[in-house]
Amino acid sequence: MRAVQQPLAQIHALLERQALAVLATRMRGRPYASLLAFAVTPDRRAILFVTRRATTKYRNIVGEPRVALLIDDRVDVGGEIGAVTAVTLLGTAAEVDAKSRPALLEHLLQRHPQIARFARAPATALFRVALRSALLVTRFQQVQRIDLRRRAEIRPALLVARAPRRR
């Protein structure tokens, strides 16, 4: 179990230290990236962010809710590529319903009070990304895939072929 906790602890620490993420969506079959402020839900199973409904980002998510978020510490380590820790979180984004919105919005604003006016505007949508898996990259080339739904399966992400099963 210790091997499982190490990468999860690294991911949780990174999410606590960093305030911004790059959101990747699809626009007419092509990649589209957006910088945004985020917060992790208390259960650590989702990411919260806001965007105006009249944006490309919003339209992209409505058209294809599967997204990726990149969060890294390159600024903290002075851009030294071998020292950077990065995580790509894969999940499904959905606009938060009216009943859940007040509590989740306040959670986001505890972390980012500077966006309160923007976040509370009627034209702004609050999104929750339900996390499915993560790719944790350390030391430039050490890549691990973590299944966040079960939180117990960690494996190298660069496997080319699997050995056949013995019967």
Image (cartoon, rainbow, N blue to C red):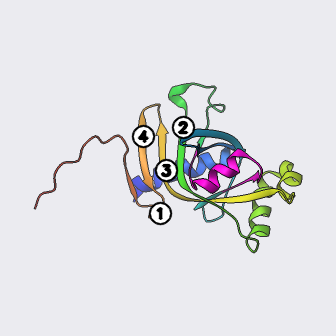
The image position of residue 59, as x and y in percent, is 68, 51
Which residue: 42% across, 40% down?
A: 143
Type of the residue with mark 2: Thr
Q: CA distance from mark 3 to mark 2?
A: 13 Å
Where does label 3 land, which residue?
A: 134
Type of the residue with mark 4: Val
Q: Residues within 10 Å of mark 2 (few under 14, many from 20)?
A: many
* Relative side of 50 to 138, left or right: right
Q: Which mark is residue 85?
A: 2
Q: Which residues are magenta?
A: 48-69
Q: Which circle's residue, 1 or 4, is located before the other in the chain? A: 4
The image position of residue 126, as x and y in percent, is 74, 59
Q: Which mark is residue 143?
A: 4
Where does label 1 land, which residue?
A: 149
Q: CA distance from mark 1 to mark 4?
A: 19 Å
Q: What is the quadrant of residue 77 in the picture?
A: top right
